[in-house]
Image: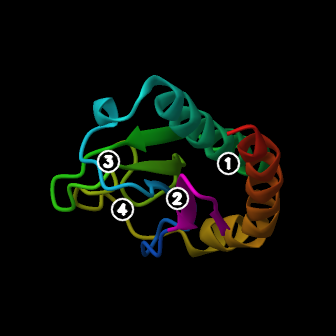
């Protein structure tokens, strides 16, 4: 979806969660604090761009941000649009489902993902030349 020298943004293929994105840092570091100050600012700016695009196009109930890295000790941020109707809400996406998938609502979100992608690409392209 977007890639530059410092990081890339991908849409994760997580069943039932079409608006699940990752900001993946290019250099192999395990922790956010391993980055220098300027890189920490850039990394969080990228996370914010993804969050704002999701809010603009999807109007989610909540945005979840996570940087777990327990299984893969490489710095990456999860940026996940959450909805009251999603199968796991209000629990984290990694918990057991609380209800069946809402197929019609998922289809609406899927239709809007093109706009999310365009906004992310446009905003990150404008942001990264300065870095």
Q: CA distance from mark 1 to mark 2?
A: 10 Å
- SS type, badge 4: loop
Q: Is residue 60 above or below residue 111?
A: above
Asked which secondary structure carries label 1, the reply is helix
Residue shown at the point (26%, 39%) measured from the top left: 31
CB atoms at circles 1 and 2 under 8 Å apart?
yes
In this rendering, position of residue 2 left or right of residue 35: right
Q: What is the spatial separation of the Cα atoms under label 3 and label 1, in whole angstroms? A: 17 Å
Instruction: Name which of mark 3 and mark 2 comes first in the sequence.
Output: 2
Is mark 3 in CB contact (under 8 Å) with mark 2?
no
Mark number displayed over residue 21: 2
Give the main secondary structure of the magenta stretch: strand
Magenta-colored span: 1-11
**Image mark count:** 4
The answer to the question of whether label 4 and label 3 lie on touching residues, with beta carbons closer than 8 A, is: no
Count neighbours of disc 3 (C-alpha within 10 A) and say few if under 14, some if 14 to 19, many if 20 or more: few
Between disc 1 and disc 2, whose residue precedes?
Answer: 2
Label 4: few (<14), some or many (≥20) within 10 Å?
few
Kindly report which numbered mark, 1 or 2, lies closer to the viewer in this rendering. Answer: 2
Which residue is labeled 4 in the image? 99
Residue topped by disc 3: 92
Mark 1 to mark 4 CA distance (whole Å): 23 Å
Q: Alpha carbon of mark 4 to alpha carbon of mark 2: how far? A: 22 Å
How far apart marks 4 and 3 lie (CA) works out to: 13 Å
23 relative position to 68: left or right: right
């Amino acid at each position: 979806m977007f890639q530059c020298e410092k990081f890339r943004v991908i849409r994760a293929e997580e069943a039932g969660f079409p608006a699940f994105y990752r900001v993946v840092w290019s250099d192999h570091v395990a922790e956010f604090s391993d980055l220098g100050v300027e890189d920490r600012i850039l990394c969080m700016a990228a996370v914010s761009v993804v969050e704002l695009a999701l809010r603009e196009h999807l109007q989610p109930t909540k945005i979840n941000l996570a940087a777990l890295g327990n299984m893969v000790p490489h710095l990456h941020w999860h940026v996940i649009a959450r909805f009251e109707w999603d199968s796991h809400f209000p629990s984290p996406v990694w918990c057991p489902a609380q209800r069946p998938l809402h197929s019609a609502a998922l289809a609406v979100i899927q239709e809007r993902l093109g706009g999310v992608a365009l906004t992310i690409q446009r905003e990150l392209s404008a942001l990264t030349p300065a870095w």
